[in-house]
Image: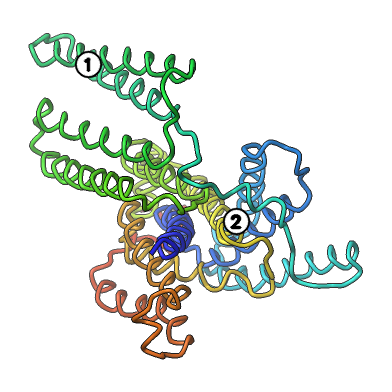
Amino acid sequence: MTIIVQYTLVFATVLALVALGGMFAEHSGVINLGLEGTMVIGALGGALAMRYLPSTLPSFLIVVLVILISILCGLIYSLLLGLACITFKADQTITGTALNILAPALATVVVKAITLNEDGKATSQLQYINMQENFVFNLTKTDMSWVIPAILIIAGLVVLFMAFKGIKNISKKVKIEFIVGGCLTLIGVLFAILFGLGILPMVTFEWALFIVLILYALFKTYLLVFKKNKVKFKKNLISAIVFGSLAILILVLNLTGFFVDLTMNWFVPLMLVLVCISVYVLYSTKFGLRLLSCGENPQAADAVGINVNRTRYIGVIISGCFAGIGGLAFIASVNSSWTFDVGVSGFGFLALAVMIFGQWKPINILLGAVLFGFFRAIGLTYVNIPFLQDMNISSSWYSMLPYVVCLIVLAFTSRKSRAPKAEGVPYDKGSRG
């Protein structure tokens, strides 16, 4: 069971990251079919960084530098799509396909040139054995004590900010908000001091996750009780129930020792953070609303002073950054070497399916990525499941499983999918009427 969970997290993380990238591009009005190729280039940049960075560097610094290099490689490669499709108004489907064909060939040539020069034998396989372990950690051995005071302080400051917004009309509810916010902030500072002095024991990753989930569920419950917003009532109620249930599940798994042998990679928490940031940026910032308008009605966006082409470039660049991280996550999560002439095994196209299944919405994309990641994990780990192994089905069928599930799911859901109206249509400023 543990190995299925590990592989599900690995594949779900890759799919979610790349699908989020495709989402930003399509919301801007550009179809990024070149996600597969961008993943390959991001993976190549990350692999080269892991090969040449000094192993004496701190583990955290290695992880950060490798991720930044993958982001830079994905960004640069995505600019080719932006240049062709936005500046020169080329066909987006053909351009994306060309980028997908170019990337594995380019990566293979680069890797063969490097291995021929250094090892005397040209091969498309690049090894980074001493660096890959920096991206993996054991949940029960990772100190995440800083998470608790950080969350308490941030939550306290948020509640205080909400209280200050209602200071003109001081009521009993506002007074309670001041008290709650002040208490949370002070408790957070106290916990930070206690953990810093070593008075409180270390909090490992799985317990930190439980605390994060339960605090978020309590925050949503607080909004239900004190912020009786009829519009968001149902949304807050569902969030409180879902996150409360997840917290209880994590608690049960902790108590049963499920996480003892479970290892995770740093891309999982990074992906979760990026999903949250994506939700906020898309629906709560001026940039997000401008991006959405460029994908729905670029003429109207241009009419109110939004630079459509610049916004689309930003959307494509964000897409390249996410795909670059996704490519690195694909090769670095469980492998210590990668053969670049096989690309990334079609995960860029599977991510597009996840994006469509998720209706171009970050949370839905995350859920779809977990679904497809689970079936991909089953396809690789079926030998560890007794009843599947006893069925004596060819391994080829299990390898096909995620793609078959993808076709079935899209067959039932694509009819209700509503893509951004202006995606795939080059914007001509002269056509604004």
* Residue 218 rendering spot, x and y as whole percentages: 20, 32
Q: Looking at the rendering, which quadrant does residue 26 occupy?
A: bottom left
Mark 1 crowdedness (10 Å alpha carbons): few <14, some 14-19, many ≥20: few
Quadrant location, the N terminus? bottom left
Q: CA distance from mark 2 to mark 1?
A: 43 Å
Q: Residue at x 44, y 44 (%)?
A: 274
Q: Residue at x 14, y 10 (%)?
A: 175
Q: Is residue 17 above or below residue 377?
A: above
Q: Residue 302, can we see it?
A: no
Q: Residue 80, can we see it?
A: yes
* Residue 42 rendering spot, x and y as whole percentages: 63, 56
Tell me the colour scheme of the image: rainbow
Horizontally, is 124 left or right of 192 in the view? right
Residue that carries the numbered disc 1 in the rendered image: 165
As helix, strand or loop, the secondary structure at mark 2 comes to: helix
Q: Is residue 153 above or below residue 422?
A: above
Give whichever of 380, 387 is nearer the camera. Answer: 387
Numbered label attached to residue 234: none
Q: First in sequence: mark 2 or mark 1?
A: 1
Residue that carries the numbered disc 2 in the rendered image: 328
Q: Looking at the rendering, which quadrant does residue 284 occupy?
A: top left
* Residue 413 rendering spot, x and y as whole percentages: 26, 72
Q: Residue at x 40, y 50 (%)?
A: 259
Q: Nearer the viewer, mark 2 or mark 1?
A: 2
Mark 2 crowdedness (10 Å alpha carbons): few <14, some 14-19, many ≥20: many
Give whichever of 392, 168 is nearer the camera. Answer: 392
Residue type beneath disc 1? Lys
Give whichever of 216, 290 is nearer the camera. Answer: 216
Q: Residue at x 60, y 61 (%)?
A: 331
* Residue 369 rendering spot, x and y as whole percentages: 38, 61
